[in-house]
Amino acid sequence: MTGKVGFLFSDFTTSQRWKFDESYFKKALHKLDPAITVIVTDAHAAQTNQQNQAKSDLTRGVKALIDVPVDSGQAAAIVRAAHANKPRVPVLAYDRLITGAFEDAYASFNGFNVGVQQGTFIKNHVAKGGTIIEIAGADTDNNAHLFHAGARSVLDPLINSGYYKLGYFKFTPNWDGATAQQECASALNTLKNKVNGVLVANDNMADYCITALKAQGLAGKIPVTGQDAQVSGLQQILLGNQSMTVYKPIKHLADAAAKIVDTWLHHKVYKGNSAKTQTGAGGTPTFLAPVITVTKANMKATVLKDGYVTRADLCKGIESACKAAGI
């Protein structure tokens, strides 16, 4: 099997994980189809860039497109263009759902459960009467809504009953860390530092929120959630500033994506491993991978054991914290 496949990324800077996705996918696909070329592009958080990159890939004759959309709704145009191409090009929505169009498959993690795990951690570590702030992801990213919905499915009953107070809530454009820091600082100022838990959607934003907490002497004193198990987040956990992250074993997702694309390259139909996901244009065959809560207690048995991070990278500059945690 020869030819080209396009892999459209939203923005490599928003999380360290994306380079892992690229590497694992290429390795898995080349194991199945050694002669396939993977064209990787980065939209730099601009959907217009991604539309043009998809158009370029189609012009270059790709046999399949894998898309991490910047904007879940606007990316529907990419699906329509790929399907209108001669020959028709199948599209895999990778990690993030594309809404308003019928993509040929959707491969991701259980996003709702990511939020459930974050919300459950807050529930288990914030006492009755506590005030919570939520710094959610990008409003244009369907995943951000899944994470938010999962977390609030746990917390809303407690907020509505008066057990907790929701002091602040914002979606964060482009998952931007500096914006998240401003949001956290604004929340702390508005609430006069009377905050007992910080629900943050991912590690990059949590890192910036921790800077705002440090400025008020609150870092390490209240629970802070995260996601992606990136090195900076894991280090903040070991230092005691962040409480947990959600680890998404990316290799499982990338391997699944490679198998889906390989199925299409051999002119077969992919049926999915989960219930079909509704996109607003029909039910899309879906692969969902599990997610894992990571704390100081199980870091060694999860991300280190899987080789997702190395001890050298994890412990760089924080050797004493690693040793204290038995790592």
Image: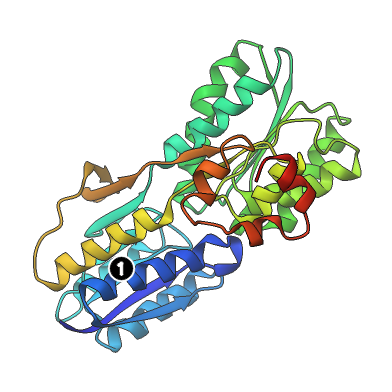
Residue 45 in view, yes or no: no
Please name the residue that numbered disc 1 is placed on: 28
Q: Give the percent coordinates (x, y) of residue 222.
A: 77, 30
Amino acid on which the number 1 mark rests in the picture: Ala
Residue at the image point whose x is 27% and y is 44% from the top: 278
**In the shown orientation, is residue 115 left or right of residue 287?**
right
Q: Give the percent coordinates (x, y) of residue 46.
A: 53, 70
Residue 277 drawn above or below residue 223: below
**Is the residue marked by circle 1 packed among few (<14), some (14-19), or many (20+) residues within 10 Å?**
some
Residue at the image point whose x is 86% and y is 31% from the top: 193
Q: Give the percent coordinates (x, y) of residue 244.
A: 62, 38
User: Which quadrant would residue 242 be assigned to in this image?
Assistant: top right
The image's colour scheme reads rainbow
**In the shown orientation, is residue 95 left or right of residue 309?**
left
Q: Secondary structure at mark 1?
A: helix
Residue 141 drawn above or below residue 80: above
Across the whole image, how many numbered discs are drawn on residues?
Answer: 1
Residue at the image point whose x is 50% and y is 68% from the top: 19
